[in-house]
Image (tube, grey):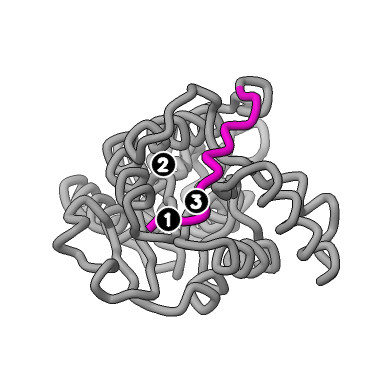
Amino acid sequence: MGIDVMREAVRTLESGQPAALVTVVASGGMTPAKPGFKMLVRPDGKTTGTVGGGALEAQAVQAALAAIRSRASTRLCYSEECGGLTHLGMVCGGEIELFVDYMSPGPEVWVFGAGHVGLAVGELAAFAGFRVTLIDDRPEYADRERAPWAHSVMACDFVEAASKAPGGPDSYVVIVTRGHAWDAQVLHGVLRLTQCPYYVGMMGSRSKVDSCFEGLRAKGVSEEALAMVHAPIGLAIGGDSPREIAVSVVAEMVAARNGRDPRCMQGGAGYGGTSNA
């Protein structure tokens, strides 16, 4: 049973979905499961394995779904002092402790723009452990043969893709399209998402960023939303080639992923070219 559960966990995470692994870590008296029993819970509530069935398992599934939503592990403890399993109406009456382990498929970054810079950022981000989705509205650029390291490649309208970008603490967006107009459209779409990504960065000179922000203010985008945008993107390491820019951008993403405030580590790495294609 344990092997089947772990195989399903790997399949789920490789598909890009989070999951929760519930494990019996301690038990006493008459219980429906013993230490080591495992159950995987997917976001749709489907399960593999068991931690004993009945009311206990129903409680475990609900706790697992809550862990997936909050992206935080937790534990369930039905001790003798609190009535044990009889508290759940189970006649066995023993005591049991479960650990609910939130499992993330890893941070995901959507790179808008598959030109020289976008390609370099995506490749380095994949090397750094990000699942990369590469987007461009030019099919000859959004070509999987150019980006074998990508989790996904999308050839579609930038605005359409921006409306589908992921949100939440494991999601990142890098905007490096071939022109200012596309950058502004993507940023506007991302900032309108119900749940914003954890990290949003846009490439460009300070003057370009200021101009873009003024346009977004005119469209009703709040100062709070604009303040979360890393623009100009990247740490100020002084490079200007596509690979050097990629190093600065991915370094900033890694800093954010590790809880460091990149704003305290950079002084505005503008890379002010008008085109990133």
Mark 2 to mark 1: distance in Å? 53 Å
Q: Give the range drawn in magenta.
A: 266-277
Q: Position of residue 157 (x, y in %)?
A: 45, 79
Q: Name the residue under label 2.
A: 30
Q: Which mark is residue 111?
A: 1
Identify the residue at horizontal 31%, vertical 44% (top origin).
Answer: 120
Q: Is residue 132 above or below residue 241?
A: below
Circles 1, 3 touching at the beta carbon (< 8 Å) = yes
- Percent coordinates x, y for residue 69 in the rendering: 58, 55
Disc 2 crowd rating (10 Å Cα; few below 14, some 14-19, many 20+) is some
Per the image, the residue denoted by label 3 is 174
Magenta span dominant secondary structure: loop
- Which structural element holds mark 1? strand
> 70 or 182, which lies in front?
182
Query: Which one is earlier in the sequence, the residue at label 1 or at label 3?
Result: 1
Q: Name which residue type carries label 3.
A: Val
Q: In which quarter of the image is the C terminus?
A: bottom left
Q: Quadrant of residue 129?
A: top left
| Residue 266 in view in this figure | yes
Q: Where is residue 184 drawn, in percent x and y?
A: 63, 64
Label 2 or label 1, whichever lies nearer to me, is: 1
- Quarter holding residue 180: bottom right
Residue 186 percent coordinates (x, y):
58, 66
